[in-house]
Amino acid sequence: MAIAVEQFFLDPSYRGTLQRQLQERVTDAILAGRFRPGERLPSSRGLARHLGISRITVTLAYTDLVANDYLSSRGRSGYFVSDSAPRPPSFPIPVRTASTVDWTRAIGQRMPEPKILNRPEDWRGYRYPFIYGQTDARLFDHQNWRKCALQALGTRDFAALTEDSYGRDDPQLVDQIIRHILPRRGIVADPSEVLVTMGAQNALWMLAQVLLTQRRTAVMEFPCYPALREILEQSRCNTLDVAVDGQGLPPEDVPPDADVVFVTPSHHCPTSATMPVARRRALLERAEAHDFLIVEDDYEFELAFTNAPSPALKSLDRAGRVAYLGSFAKSLFPGLRLGYVVAPEPLIRELRALRSLTLRHIPGHIQRATAYFLAQGHYDAQVHKMARAYRERRAVTEIAIQTNGLTLAGASGFGGSSFWMQAPDGVQAATLADRLRARQVLIEPAGAFFGTGRDPETHYRLAYSSITVTDIPEGIRRIAEEGRALGHTAA
Amino acid sequence: MAIAVEQFFLDPSYRGTLQRQLQERVTDAILAGRFRPGERLPSSRGLARHLGISRITVTLAYTDLVANDYLSSRGRSGYFVSDSAPRPPSFPIPVRTASTVDWTRAIGQRMPEPKILNRPEDWRGYRYPFIYGQTDARLFDHQNWRKCALQALGTRDFAALTEDSYGRDDPQLVDQIIRHILPRRGIVADPSEVLVTMGAQNALWMLAQVLLTQRRTAVMEFPCYPALREILEQSRCNTLDVAVDGQGLPPEDVPPDADVVFVTPSHHCPTSATMPVARRRALLERAEAHDFLIVEDDYEFELAFTNAPSPALKSLDRAGRVAYLGSFAKSLFPGLRLGYVVAPEPLIRELRALRSLTLRHIPGHIQRATAYFLAQGHYDAQVHKMARAYRERRAVTEIAIQTNGLTLAGASGFGGSSFWMQAPDGVQAATLADRLRARQVLIEPAGAFFGTGRDPETHYRLAYSSITVTDIPEGIRRIAEEGRALGHTAA
């Protein structure tokens, strides 16, 4: 039996080549049982005429389908659905029914509702996106990433790509982290002291699981990275906030009964305050005196461009009290979900066992591609390029902030990718953000950094990692304008 | 100042092109501070002669280093270390010190020691690897996987690759799972009822966290998938084993106080028993009568080649009591770490919140590459090819088992990728495996399926997913030979 050309049509909204669309039409029809084994496909000439496309496109699609065993070619007789093509299922598809289970009761452990995002999903469509933590396509070295990823897809890396590696990490990535990244932070480590994680979120979560119990006390900075707050709340340990000042966390305010202290010394999240070396030493001494551990989140360390970067807290740690946490979210991209923990071996061993239990290992391809990106120097070039662009954007933003009379709430000697800002008197940051959104400007109200019920509703974060330098002045001007308008209404 | 050619050397053990090695030499030296900004590199002619390589290789390496801002080209004067090349760190590197922390005390929650692997890391070097769950390079469609991965690395998918997508999944992958995979299992689902996971391990772990507490009871099959046993032990719920027979789990043996029952109905892990439809209905009725939930692990469903596959338990579930779990570990490869859960929306919502907390989301690239592989029909062709090869291998293995008088411990009408075997009387499976290893044969003693202290030491798994059909008879012959030799010693 011959399949009629009328069974074929093209979807103008299809995102992909004509050849691929044609192939999908055929495979979908075979899998749905509409085209059956032995049936003849239309001639390439006839189908091309019917669809108004070139004959070579049809021929290429057919050839590929033969290679994949959907079609078979019988010389001059044409193309047929292959006898060994995948079959549709032989049983009828039931109708969907609603669950009658009482899920409120059935769910044993309720998770905290994830915080609502401060930015719309389509943020790339906005002209003035002062948003944090996403990748700037203008700065990311996509071409070399593709090259490295393609290399990691090669035959030589077949095992690294495909194997179930249970608890193991890619030795090439661990080697690169140890030789290439940690020395810049003043950290020396052995492979047994490094664990690769699914980004910083996964690292913080695992550290909280392994180090905390319901009888232990975790100290966090106030304000604080919202994801850490959620993780600690869910772990059910006791938590204590310690307010930061212009130099980050004051060590003398850490209570003696602390078990684990979570800090961001290079630049505090979100105020960007950098902890001076004297304070770092004092914090380590206090940890030794009161026997607590420290988790150092060194996020964005690559972006220390306003001054020479200070070495990590971990590099001053002689007693092995610090678990150090790095991430590729900012230097590469957050969708990669790649980070690492550097800590004494007994702790790494426990974290590895937890990782094995929860997800086994990090996908091999991601690890190997990153190892190549590091080994071939692209990481350094990338970080260098970003730092240069951010320095320029930061300078332009700073001038615009002054010119327009906006209020800085924190300053940093570090760099980074954002400013910590205060809304005008009587103006709620969330209201300001809402009003600005209608004017193509995105800013991030900072409530989540303070925690539920403790938001002064006065702060916002102004990030320059996803906005062009030329758009910054006008964006800031609009923020000031809306701020003044709202301030007048409030007064 | 000029950099002398003597600073360059080649490492014959380097795995990569000459050009890449040369680039790494230069970037390493710049980052270590050995080559400084403004210094002149050797001429391409001089360096090529010194290293005994072609001049074009040196020129290509230099050109790439210019593009990445490590070098600058000054026309006829040659190549220099760029003034804006990345700088080495400015502080001295400390020496490594041992941790003085008492980690036995500091670790709050100890994780179960992951089970020791039953196979050597270098299993690919063995001639007769009857090992389970790894990818066969002869069967995997590596070429089309590369094509799809490369497509997912393109500019059009930049956001899918790079973005922090918080709790969201790739809509294209979810769509493919719903339209392309679930219908073959008789399952109809809405996107809100699907969650992408880091493989089956992650799915089972999350389900245990959300559904179980210390006051609830989980039922598992006996023997049972070892990773599930570890997950349930660590979750601290009550656990009960129910022994399977030749038709899988007997529903009437599930105690009425069960809260969650973990089953592998399509083919029981590890005995490969298939649960008949009547039992499936009985299990669902019992779940309704005693108000328990069911987690259906439908692993390897793609390999149902000996009979037409029966629809999933989930497809018979009118009350919404079943959480269905699928994985791409067998059909694609385990290093991908990709799986999914299909369950009622209130449960998916909790699982999603837990996933956000523990690791945020699954890497975008992996999701999109898989979506393309599915959409373009490669997945079906792949599964088809595997099933065909496995069918042949299974038949040859079965004949060799009979010819050599080995003892089958379980039979299956399903297919799959392994046989469940019993060692000869008086012979420990682990001893047999050890002896065989010296003879290039790898089999998997099955102690982990029974749990600590309950291993009869009599069973092993014989997988044919990683051995060529031509090597099977000789491999089986050696197993029989060693078994007889050990049996004589035991007698």
Image: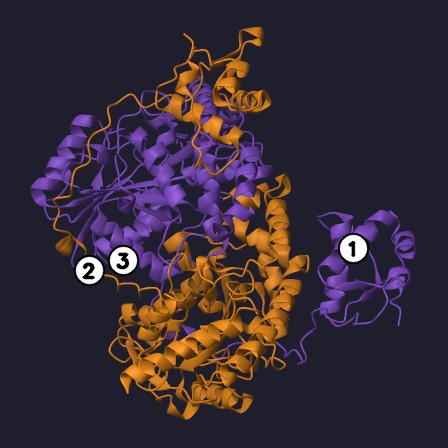
Chain colours: A orange, B purple
Which is nearer the N-term, disc 3 or disc 1?
Answer: 1
Q: Chain of mark 1?
A: B
Residues under labels 3 and 1: Cα distance?
A: 56 Å
Residues under labels 2 and 1: Cα distance?
A: 63 Å
Residue B263 location, x and y as percent?
Answer: 25, 39
The three-letter amino acid code for the residue at tag 2 is Gln
Residue A382 location, x and y as percent?
Answer: 63, 63
In which quadrant is the C terminus of chain A drawn?
Answer: bottom left
Which is nearer the N-term, disc 2 or disc 1?
Answer: 1
Residue B214's mark? 2
Residue A490 left/right relative to B24: left
In which quadrant is the N terminus of chain A drawn?
Answer: top left
The three-letter amino acid code for the residue at tag 1 is Thr
Q: Dot 2 lies on which element? A: loop
Q: Which residue is mark 3?
A: B235
Q: Chain of mark 2?
A: B
Tell me, yes or no, if residue B424 can be seen here: no
Residues under labels 2 and 3: Cα distance?
A: 8 Å
Q: Dot 3 lies on which element? A: helix
Few, some or many C-alpha atoms within 10 Å of disc 1 (few <14, some 14-19, many ≥20)? some
Q: Which residue is mark 1?
A: B63
Few, some or many C-alpha atoms within 10 Å of disc 3 (few <14, some 14-19, many ≥20)? some
Q: Residue at x 35, y 32 (%)?
A: B301
